[in-house]
Image: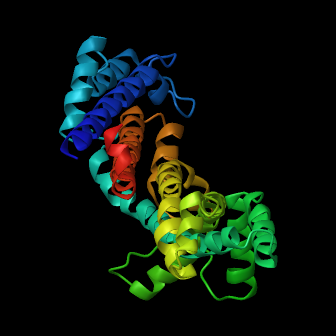
Amino acid sequence: MAGFLLRRVAGAVAMLFVVGTIVFSLLAIVPGDPAELLLSTGGGVATPEAIANLRTQMGLDQPLIAQYLGFLWDSLRFDFGSSIIDGSSIAANIALRLPRTLEIIGAGTVLALLVAIPAGTAAGLRAGGWFDVAASGLNALLTSVPGFVVGTLFIYFFAQTLGWLPAGGYVAFAQNPAQHLQMLILPAVTVGLHLATIIFRMTRASVLEMRGHDWVRTAIAKGLTRRLVIRRHVLKNALGPVITVVGMQLGILLGSTVLVEFVYNWPGLSGLLVGAVEQRDYPTVRAVILTVAAIFIAINLVIDILYSLIDPRIRLQ
Protein backbone atom coordinates (compact mmCIF):
# COMPACT_ATOMS: atom_id res chain seq x y z
CA MET A 1 0.00 0.00 0.00
CA ALA A 2 2.85 2.40 0.80
CA GLY A 3 4.38 1.88 -2.64
CA PHE A 4 1.01 2.46 -4.31
CA LEU A 5 0.50 5.73 -2.42
CA LEU A 6 4.04 6.87 -3.21
CA ARG A 7 3.53 6.27 -6.94
CA ARG A 8 0.22 8.09 -6.96
CA VAL A 9 1.56 11.09 -5.03
CA ALA A 10 4.61 11.32 -7.28
CA GLY A 11 2.37 11.18 -10.33
CA ALA A 12 0.14 13.93 -8.90
CA VAL A 13 3.13 16.20 -8.25
CA ALA A 14 4.46 15.61 -11.75
CA MET A 15 1.06 16.34 -13.27
CA LEU A 16 0.77 19.59 -11.32
CA PHE A 17 4.22 20.62 -12.57
CA VAL A 18 3.16 19.91 -16.16
CA VAL A 19 -0.07 21.89 -15.74
CA GLY A 20 1.81 24.85 -14.26
CA THR A 21 4.26 24.80 -17.16
CA ILE A 22 1.45 24.69 -19.73
CA VAL A 23 -0.44 27.53 -18.06
CA PHE A 24 2.67 29.73 -17.94
CA SER A 25 3.59 28.91 -21.53
CA LEU A 26 0.14 29.61 -22.97
CA LEU A 27 -0.10 33.01 -21.33
CA ALA A 28 3.50 33.80 -22.29
CA ILE A 29 2.85 33.27 -26.00
CA VAL A 30 -0.36 35.34 -26.10
CA PRO A 31 0.13 37.93 -28.88
CA GLY A 32 0.72 41.51 -27.77
CA ASP A 33 2.25 43.14 -24.72
CA PRO A 34 0.03 42.44 -21.67
CA ALA A 35 1.02 45.75 -20.08
CA GLU A 36 0.16 47.74 -23.19
CA LEU A 37 -3.11 45.85 -23.70
CA LEU A 38 -4.10 46.47 -20.10
CA LEU A 39 -3.32 50.18 -20.13
CA SER A 40 -5.04 50.71 -23.46
CA THR A 41 -8.28 49.09 -22.27
CA GLY A 42 -11.18 51.50 -22.72
CA GLY A 43 -9.67 53.33 -25.69
CA GLY A 44 -6.93 55.17 -23.80
CA VAL A 45 -3.41 55.66 -25.12
CA ALA A 46 -0.67 54.49 -22.78
CA THR A 47 2.63 56.35 -22.55
CA PRO A 48 5.90 54.41 -22.90
CA GLU A 49 6.80 55.31 -19.31
CA ALA A 50 3.53 53.88 -17.97
CA ILE A 51 3.99 50.70 -20.03
CA ALA A 52 7.55 50.27 -18.77
CA ASN A 53 6.47 50.76 -15.14
CA LEU A 54 3.68 48.21 -15.48
CA ARG A 55 5.99 45.72 -17.18
CA THR A 56 8.37 46.06 -14.23
CA GLN A 57 5.49 45.61 -11.79
CA MET A 58 4.35 42.45 -13.61
CA GLY A 59 7.92 41.13 -13.93
CA LEU A 60 7.74 41.17 -17.73
CA ASP A 61 11.06 42.97 -18.03
CA GLN A 62 12.90 39.86 -16.86
CA PRO A 63 14.08 37.01 -19.13
CA LEU A 64 11.43 34.39 -19.83
CA ILE A 65 13.28 31.66 -17.94
CA ALA A 66 13.54 33.93 -14.91
CA GLN A 67 9.81 34.62 -15.08
CA TYR A 68 9.12 30.88 -15.30
CA LEU A 69 11.33 29.95 -12.34
CA GLY A 70 9.85 32.79 -10.32
CA PHE A 71 6.35 31.58 -11.18
CA LEU A 72 7.16 28.04 -10.01
CA TRP A 73 8.78 29.25 -6.79
CA ASP A 74 5.91 31.60 -5.96
CA SER A 75 3.37 28.86 -6.71
CA LEU A 76 5.12 26.46 -4.33
CA ARG A 77 4.82 29.12 -1.61
CA PHE A 78 1.20 29.90 -2.54
CA ASP A 79 2.31 33.45 -3.27
CA PHE A 80 0.37 34.51 -6.35
CA GLY A 81 1.13 38.21 -6.02
CA SER A 82 -1.35 41.04 -6.43
CA SER A 83 -4.04 41.72 -8.98
CA ILE A 84 -2.90 44.26 -11.55
CA ILE A 85 -6.45 45.64 -11.67
CA ASP A 86 -7.01 46.74 -8.08
CA GLY A 87 -3.82 45.64 -6.29
CA SER A 88 -5.65 43.15 -4.04
CA SER A 89 -4.03 39.91 -2.94
CA ILE A 90 -4.79 37.13 -5.43
CA ALA A 91 -4.39 34.44 -2.79
CA ALA A 92 -6.87 36.27 -0.54
CA ASN A 93 -9.37 36.57 -3.40
CA ILE A 94 -9.10 32.86 -4.13
CA ALA A 95 -9.37 31.96 -0.44
CA LEU A 96 -12.54 34.08 -0.24
CA ARG A 97 -14.26 32.76 -3.35
CA LEU A 98 -13.13 29.13 -3.52
CA PRO A 99 -15.17 27.95 -0.49
CA ARG A 100 -18.29 29.42 -2.08
CA THR A 101 -17.82 27.39 -5.25
CA LEU A 102 -16.92 24.26 -3.27
CA GLU A 103 -20.05 24.75 -1.19
CA ILE A 104 -22.28 24.61 -4.26
CA ILE A 105 -20.43 21.60 -5.65
CA GLY A 106 -20.38 19.79 -2.30
CA ALA A 107 -24.08 20.30 -1.60
CA GLY A 108 -24.99 19.34 -5.16
CA THR A 109 -22.85 16.21 -5.00
CA VAL A 110 -24.44 15.05 -1.74
CA LEU A 111 -27.92 15.51 -3.23
CA ALA A 112 -26.91 13.69 -6.41
CA LEU A 113 -25.44 10.72 -4.52
CA LEU A 114 -28.47 10.40 -2.23
CA VAL A 115 -30.82 10.27 -5.21
CA ALA A 116 -28.88 8.72 -8.09
CA ILE A 117 -27.21 5.72 -6.42
CA PRO A 118 -30.42 4.23 -4.94
CA ALA A 119 -32.34 5.01 -8.13
CA GLY A 120 -29.63 3.57 -10.37
CA THR A 121 -29.36 0.46 -8.21
CA ALA A 122 -33.12 -0.12 -8.28
CA ALA A 123 -33.22 0.41 -12.06
CA GLY A 124 -30.30 -1.97 -12.63
CA LEU A 125 -31.79 -4.69 -10.45
CA ARG A 126 -35.17 -4.42 -12.21
CA ALA A 127 -34.03 -3.72 -15.76
CA GLY A 128 -36.96 -3.44 -18.13
CA GLY A 129 -39.48 -2.85 -15.36
CA TRP A 130 -41.71 0.17 -14.99
CA PHE A 131 -39.35 1.94 -12.61
CA ASP A 132 -36.37 1.41 -14.91
CA VAL A 133 -38.28 2.74 -17.92
CA ALA A 134 -39.64 5.77 -16.04
CA ALA A 135 -36.33 6.62 -14.34
CA SER A 136 -34.29 6.18 -17.53
CA GLY A 137 -36.71 8.36 -19.49
CA LEU A 138 -36.59 11.11 -16.88
CA ASN A 139 -32.82 10.84 -16.76
CA ALA A 140 -32.57 11.21 -20.54
CA LEU A 141 -34.80 14.30 -20.39
CA LEU A 142 -32.72 15.95 -17.66
CA THR A 143 -29.49 15.11 -19.50
CA SER A 144 -30.66 17.00 -22.59
CA VAL A 145 -31.45 20.22 -20.68
CA PRO A 146 -28.45 22.55 -20.10
CA GLY A 147 -27.72 23.71 -16.57
CA PHE A 148 -28.38 27.38 -17.24
CA VAL A 149 -31.82 26.49 -18.65
CA VAL A 150 -32.61 24.49 -15.51
CA GLY A 151 -31.44 27.40 -13.39
CA THR A 152 -33.62 29.86 -15.30
CA LEU A 153 -36.68 27.60 -14.96
CA PHE A 154 -36.03 27.17 -11.24
CA ILE A 155 -35.88 30.93 -10.77
CA TYR A 156 -39.11 31.40 -12.72
CA PHE A 157 -41.10 28.75 -10.85
CA PHE A 158 -39.67 28.65 -7.32
CA ALA A 159 -38.65 32.30 -6.95
CA GLN A 160 -40.86 34.44 -9.16
CA THR A 161 -44.05 32.35 -9.46
CA LEU A 162 -44.25 30.54 -6.13
CA GLY A 163 -42.02 32.83 -4.09
CA TRP A 164 -40.61 29.94 -2.05
CA LEU A 165 -36.92 30.72 -2.50
CA PRO A 166 -34.79 33.76 -3.40
CA ALA A 167 -33.88 34.17 -7.06
CA GLY A 168 -30.18 34.55 -6.33
CA GLY A 169 -27.57 36.49 -4.45
CA TYR A 170 -25.27 35.62 -1.59
CA VAL A 171 -25.27 36.15 2.16
CA ALA A 172 -22.51 34.76 4.36
CA PHE A 173 -23.52 31.88 6.63
CA ALA A 174 -22.16 33.65 9.69
CA GLN A 175 -24.24 36.73 8.89
CA ASN A 176 -27.58 34.96 8.36
CA PRO A 177 -27.54 31.12 8.37
CA ALA A 178 -31.19 30.68 7.36
CA GLN A 179 -30.99 33.09 4.43
CA HIS A 180 -27.66 31.59 3.33
CA LEU A 181 -29.16 28.10 3.17
CA GLN A 182 -32.19 29.39 1.27
CA MET A 183 -29.93 30.99 -1.34
CA LEU A 184 -27.87 27.79 -1.58
CA ILE A 185 -30.78 25.45 -2.40
CA LEU A 186 -31.42 26.37 -6.03
CA PRO A 187 -27.74 26.51 -7.14
CA ALA A 188 -27.00 23.22 -5.37
CA VAL A 189 -29.99 21.45 -6.90
CA THR A 190 -29.08 22.80 -10.34
CA VAL A 191 -25.56 21.40 -10.05
CA GLY A 192 -26.81 18.18 -8.43
CA LEU A 193 -29.31 17.40 -11.19
CA HIS A 194 -26.64 17.34 -13.88
CA LEU A 195 -24.35 15.19 -11.75
CA ALA A 196 -27.21 12.87 -10.76
CA THR A 197 -27.93 12.00 -14.39
CA ILE A 198 -24.35 10.82 -14.88
CA ILE A 199 -24.23 8.88 -11.59
CA PHE A 200 -27.58 7.25 -12.36
CA ARG A 201 -26.44 5.97 -15.76
CA MET A 202 -23.16 4.64 -14.42
CA THR A 203 -24.77 3.00 -11.36
CA ARG A 204 -27.46 1.33 -13.44
CA ALA A 205 -25.00 0.01 -16.02
CA SER A 206 -22.56 -1.20 -13.37
CA VAL A 207 -25.24 -2.97 -11.29
CA LEU A 208 -26.69 -4.51 -14.43
CA GLU A 209 -23.26 -5.87 -15.33
CA MET A 210 -22.41 -7.17 -11.85
CA ARG A 211 -25.69 -9.02 -11.26
CA GLY A 212 -24.96 -11.25 -14.26
CA HIS A 213 -21.60 -12.53 -12.98
CA ASP A 214 -21.07 -16.10 -11.83
CA TRP A 215 -20.26 -15.21 -8.23
CA VAL A 216 -23.66 -13.54 -7.83
CA ARG A 217 -25.49 -16.61 -9.10
CA THR A 218 -23.33 -18.79 -6.87
CA ALA A 219 -24.14 -16.67 -3.83
CA ILE A 220 -27.85 -16.94 -4.59
CA ALA A 221 -27.55 -20.71 -5.10
CA LYS A 222 -25.86 -21.04 -1.69
CA GLY A 223 -28.96 -19.63 -0.05
CA LEU A 224 -27.85 -16.10 0.79
CA THR A 225 -30.64 -13.56 1.08
CA ARG A 226 -31.26 -11.18 -1.81
CA ARG A 227 -30.43 -8.14 0.33
CA LEU A 228 -27.12 -9.64 1.43
CA VAL A 229 -26.17 -10.60 -2.13
CA ILE A 230 -26.95 -7.08 -3.40
CA ARG A 231 -25.01 -5.38 -0.62
CA ARG A 232 -21.91 -7.61 -0.54
CA HIS A 233 -21.56 -8.88 -4.08
CA VAL A 234 -23.39 -6.53 -6.43
CA LEU A 235 -23.33 -3.02 -4.99
CA LYS A 236 -19.84 -3.22 -3.50
CA ASN A 237 -18.29 -4.22 -6.82
CA ALA A 238 -20.45 -1.80 -8.79
CA LEU A 239 -19.34 1.25 -6.78
CA GLY A 240 -15.81 1.29 -8.20
CA PRO A 241 -16.69 2.80 -11.60
CA VAL A 242 -19.22 5.09 -9.93
CA ILE A 243 -16.57 6.54 -7.61
CA THR A 244 -14.26 7.14 -10.58
CA VAL A 245 -16.97 8.98 -12.51
CA VAL A 246 -17.91 11.08 -9.49
CA GLY A 247 -14.27 12.09 -8.99
CA MET A 248 -13.88 13.11 -12.63
CA GLN A 249 -17.12 15.08 -12.57
CA LEU A 250 -16.14 16.94 -9.40
CA GLY A 251 -13.06 18.24 -11.17
CA ILE A 252 -15.10 19.21 -14.21
CA LEU A 253 -17.68 20.98 -12.05
CA LEU A 254 -14.97 23.30 -10.72
CA GLY A 255 -14.72 24.83 -14.16
CA SER A 256 -18.31 24.40 -15.36
CA THR A 257 -20.15 26.09 -12.49
CA VAL A 258 -19.51 29.48 -14.07
CA LEU A 259 -22.95 29.53 -15.71
CA VAL A 260 -24.67 28.43 -12.50
CA GLU A 261 -22.88 31.11 -10.52
CA PHE A 262 -23.78 33.67 -13.17
CA VAL A 263 -27.47 32.71 -13.26
CA TYR A 264 -27.81 32.87 -9.48
CA ASN A 265 -25.39 35.78 -8.98
CA TRP A 266 -23.26 33.59 -6.69
CA PRO A 267 -19.79 35.17 -6.16
CA GLY A 268 -17.62 32.10 -6.55
CA LEU A 269 -14.30 31.24 -8.12
CA SER A 270 -15.66 31.00 -11.65
CA GLY A 271 -16.75 34.63 -11.57
CA LEU A 272 -13.26 35.64 -10.45
CA LEU A 273 -11.73 33.80 -13.41
CA VAL A 274 -14.13 35.27 -15.96
CA GLY A 275 -13.55 38.78 -14.64
CA ALA A 276 -9.79 38.30 -14.74
CA VAL A 277 -9.92 37.08 -18.35
CA GLU A 278 -12.08 40.02 -19.42
CA GLN A 279 -9.73 42.52 -17.76
CA ARG A 280 -6.54 40.72 -18.86
CA ASP A 281 -5.45 40.21 -15.28
CA TYR A 282 -2.97 37.46 -16.21
CA PRO A 283 -1.55 36.81 -12.70
CA THR A 284 -5.08 36.13 -11.44
CA VAL A 285 -5.86 33.93 -14.45
CA ARG A 286 -2.76 31.82 -13.87
CA ALA A 287 -3.44 31.52 -10.14
CA VAL A 288 -7.07 30.47 -10.56
CA ILE A 289 -6.31 27.91 -13.28
CA LEU A 290 -3.47 26.45 -11.23
CA THR A 291 -5.71 26.27 -8.15
CA VAL A 292 -8.47 24.48 -10.06
CA ALA A 293 -5.93 22.07 -11.57
CA ALA A 294 -4.43 21.33 -8.14
CA ILE A 295 -7.87 20.55 -6.71
CA PHE A 296 -8.71 18.37 -9.71
CA ILE A 297 -5.48 16.41 -9.31
CA ALA A 298 -6.05 16.07 -5.55
CA ILE A 299 -9.57 14.74 -6.15
CA ASN A 300 -8.26 12.14 -8.57
CA LEU A 301 -5.61 11.12 -6.03
CA VAL A 302 -8.29 10.60 -3.40
CA ILE A 303 -10.40 8.63 -5.88
CA ASP A 304 -7.44 6.35 -6.68
CA ILE A 305 -6.98 5.66 -2.98
CA LEU A 306 -10.69 4.95 -2.44
CA TYR A 307 -10.77 2.70 -5.50
CA SER A 308 -7.78 0.74 -4.18
CA LEU A 309 -9.62 0.18 -0.89
CA ILE A 310 -12.65 -1.19 -2.72
CA ASP A 311 -10.63 -3.28 -5.19
CA PRO A 312 -7.24 -4.35 -3.73
CA ARG A 313 -6.12 -5.54 -7.18
CA ILE A 314 -5.60 -1.89 -8.16
CA ARG A 315 -2.66 -1.63 -5.73
CA LEU A 316 -0.75 -4.30 -7.67
CA GLN A 317 -0.96 -2.50 -11.01
**Residue positioned 46% across, 53% down in the render:** 247
Side of 253 relative to 141 (left or right): left
Q: How is the image coloured?
A: rainbow
**Residue positioned 33% across, 25% down in the render:** 54
Compared with 159, 230 (above or below) is: above
Q: Quadrant of residue 50?
A: top left
Side of 121 relative to 89 (left or right): right
Side of 123 relative to 308 (left or right): right
Whether residue 264 appears in this view of the structure is no
Side of 264 relative to 281 (left or right): right
Closer-to-camera residue (271/203): 203
Give how far across and how far down residue 234 sits, in percent. 54, 66
Closer-to-camera residue (235/52): 235
**Residue positioned 19% across, 44% down in the render:** 2
Going by the picture, which residue comes out furthest to the top? 63
Give how far across and how far down residue 58 sits, in percent. 30, 27
Give how far across and how far down residue 292 sits, in percent. 41, 45
Compared with 240, 21 (above or below) is: above
**Residue positioned 41% across, 46% down in the render:** 296
Q: Quadrant of residue 286?
A: top left
Give how far across and how far down residue 236 sits, in percent. 47, 65
Closer-to-camera residue (97/198): 198
Whether residue 39 appears in this view of the structure is yes
Looking at the figure, which quarter contains the C terminus?
top left
